[in-house]
Image (tube, rainbow, N blue to C red):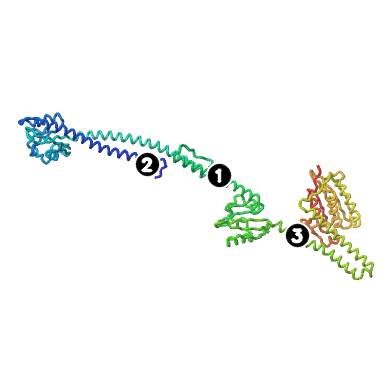
């Protein structure tokens, strides 16, 4: 059976009170009973000595039976006079005629003690009176002779007094016991109340209510325990606040990381994942407990994880997800005590793409430079071999070709320098108010002769009242020149090139449309890359460097605008760019 602390305390107090009351009752009962008998024996001895004096003062012929009867009635006791040989001479409780029939009393303890010279006493059952009796005896020596005066008193009255005393004592002990139980209940409540408050506070500490404090009164052990609990709560509250701050800092760091971070338990189940990882692998919010194999089934990724689990060592390897066209540099680190794994996913797709662009750029630049350099070197060697002096017409043609390719090298270098300048971090253009119609007219005038020589009609349909834009006039002319020159180059004889502009709420859109062969859809996404050509041989023959559209894109980005292209094979192409309207 389980008891509360208060119940145990009350029960212990009650048992202690009951034990003390029982011991008190037993001791008092025994002590008072013995005391009552002793007091009665003393009183009876005193009366026996009174009788002794009476007998010793009698003459020799006095009637002992009458004396015994008279004194026994007065003293309410049985008086027996016994001769020195043990014969009963008189007895107040027996008729005179029956005295001679009483048995010899010499062997009685009290009689024997009285003849020995001391006061005798004994307690025993009387066969004559059929009751328990208290006997006392004293020796007498007078004119009537020598003998023993024995007084006997029934103990029935003593038993009645003893019973009355038992009842009184029991009532007293019962009352004291009830009061002790009442005080035990009150005292156990007073003692257990602060302990209960401390237990409740400790239980609330266990559920995170660290701001709670135990009320303290006094300077006893309970108050000391309360102070210890409050100090413990203070320390735990500080530690919890520190852990909360650390957790918040960790969550902030993980949330702000561009790299995906995931923590796995020894069974490969996710216990923690930052937003970047959930975004990459489309993990739901309630991700805890999901296995990595359920999140991603890429065999390369799972093979790396399995290799890490088998060896228990740090593993770093690049993994490509073909479906998302993303390459990750993954790093797998074991947690201490075999508690799991921390994996970091760093997206290196841009680095891979930049490496590919760099390789393509180097290859394209090398290819673009190799052709004119080879031509210039070949023609120069031919001229040095004697053509310069022997064949003037051929030499002139060779020199013209060398100059043409040198011009092409100069254009290529100029475009590379321009593109490099535009791509420098922090580079900005000086903007001013520019009328778009003036820029379009100036550029179309520069290319008018080229268009006429090729038989291409160029029309400028940009409205005169088109809004003023904030732009760098020189760079804007370069955009118009590159786009319009490309349109003329790719438009066959008899074709048309048209320039137009539309004004929106906050931006101005310029379109350059041609009736050339158009561009296949698979080429459109890469059209503004460096050196990308839809028809490499034709573009090279036209003298292009392959960097014009890339320059246009970067100039528009620096203006806060955009650039785009729409094309239908066999119909023509439309290149467009947007500029913010000056407010």
401 is higher (above) or lower (below) than 579: below
> Which residue is identified by label 2?
12
Q: Which numbered disc flags the more N-terminal residue, 1 or 3?
A: 1
- State the CA–CA distance, disc 2 to disc 3: 90 Å
Residue 507 spot, x, y in % from top left: 80, 45
Q: Which mark is drawn over residue 502? A: none
Do the numbered discs 2 and 1 sit on residues whose CB atoms are within 8 Å?
no
> Which residue is identified by label 1?
238
Q: Quadrant of residue 13?
A: top left
52 is higher (above) or lower (below) than 506: above
> Which residue is identified by label 3?
358
Q: Residue furthest front?
A: 117
Q: Which numbered disc flags the more N-terminal residue, 2 or 3?
A: 2
Residue 477 visible in the snapshot: yes
Q: Quadrant of residue 310?
A: bottom right
Residue 135 spot, x, y in % from top left: 15, 37
Element on which disc 1 rests:
helix
């Amino acid at each position: 059976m389980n008891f509360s602390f208060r119940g145990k305390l009350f029960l212990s107090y009650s048992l202690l009170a009951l034990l003390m009351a029982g011991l008190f009752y037993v001791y008092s009962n025994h002590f008072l009973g013995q005391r009552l008998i002793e007091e009665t024996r003393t009183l009876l001895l005193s009366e026996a000595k009174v009788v002794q004096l009476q007998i010793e003062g009698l003459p020799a012929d006095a009637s002992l039976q009458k004396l015994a009867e008279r004194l026994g009635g007065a003293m309410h006791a049985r008086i027996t006079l016994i001769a020195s040989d043990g014969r009963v001479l008189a007895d107040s409780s027996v008729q005179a005629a029956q005295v001679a029939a009483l048995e010899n009393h010499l062997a009685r303890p009290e009689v024997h003690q009285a003849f020995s010279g001391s006061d005798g006493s004994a307690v025993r059952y009387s066969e004559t009176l059929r009751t328990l009796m208290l006997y006392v005896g004293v020796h007498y020596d007078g004119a009537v002779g020598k003998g023993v005066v024995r007084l006997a008193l029934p103990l029935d009255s003593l038993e009645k007094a003893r019973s009355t005393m038992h009842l009184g004592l029991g009532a007293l002990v019962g009352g004291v016991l009830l009061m002790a139980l009442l005080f035990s209940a009150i005292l156990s409540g007073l003692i257990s109340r602060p302990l209960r408050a401390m237990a409740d506070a400790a239980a609330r500490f266990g559920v995170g209510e660290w701001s709670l404090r135990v009320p303290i009164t006094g300077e006893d052990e309970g108050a000391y325990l309360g102070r210890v609990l409050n100090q413990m709560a203070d320390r735990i509250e500080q530690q919890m606040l520190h852990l909360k701050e650390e957790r918040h800092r960790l969550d902030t760091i993980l949330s702000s990381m561009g790299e995906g971070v995931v923590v796995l338990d020894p069974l490969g189940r996710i216990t923690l994942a930052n937003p970047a990882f959930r975004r990459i692998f489309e993990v739901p919010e309630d991700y805890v407990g999901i296995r990595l194999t359920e999140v991603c089934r890429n065999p390369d990724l799972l093979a790396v994880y399995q290799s890490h689990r088998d060896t228990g060592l740090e593993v770093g390897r690049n993994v490509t997800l073909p479906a998302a066209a993303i390459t990750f540099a993954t790093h797998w680190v074991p947690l201490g005590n075999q508690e799991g794994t921390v994996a970091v996913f760093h997206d290196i797709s841009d680095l891979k793409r930049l490496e590919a662009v760099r390789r393509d750029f180097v290859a394209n630049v090398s290819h673009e430079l190799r052709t004119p350099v080879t031509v210039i070197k070949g023609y120069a060697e031919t001229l040095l071999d004697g053509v310069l002096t022997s064949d003037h017409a051929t030499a002139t043609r060779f020199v013209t070709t060398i100059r043409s390719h040198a011009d092409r090298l100069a254009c290529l270098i100029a475009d590379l320098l321009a593109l490099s300048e535009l791509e420098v971090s922090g580079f900005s253009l000086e903007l001013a108010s520019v009328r778009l119609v003036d820029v379009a007219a100036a550029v179309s005038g520069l290319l008018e002769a080229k268009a006429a020589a090729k038989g291409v009609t160029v029309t400028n349909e940009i409205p005169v009242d088109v809004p003023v834009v904030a732009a760098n006039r020189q760079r804007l002319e370069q955009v118009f020149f590159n786009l319009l020159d490309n349109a003329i180059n790719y438009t066959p004889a008899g074709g048309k090139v048209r320039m137009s502009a539309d004004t929106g709420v906050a931006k101005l859109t310029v379109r350059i449309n041609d009736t050339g062969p158009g561009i296949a859809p698979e080429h459109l996404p890469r059209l503004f890359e460096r050196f990308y050509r839809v028809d490499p041989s034709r573009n090279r023959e036209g003298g292009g460097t392959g960097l014009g559209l890339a320059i246009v894109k970067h100039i528009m980005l620096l203006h806060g605008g955009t650039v785009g292209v729409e094309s239908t094979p066999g119909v023509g192409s439309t290149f467009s760019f947007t500029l913010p309207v000056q407010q």
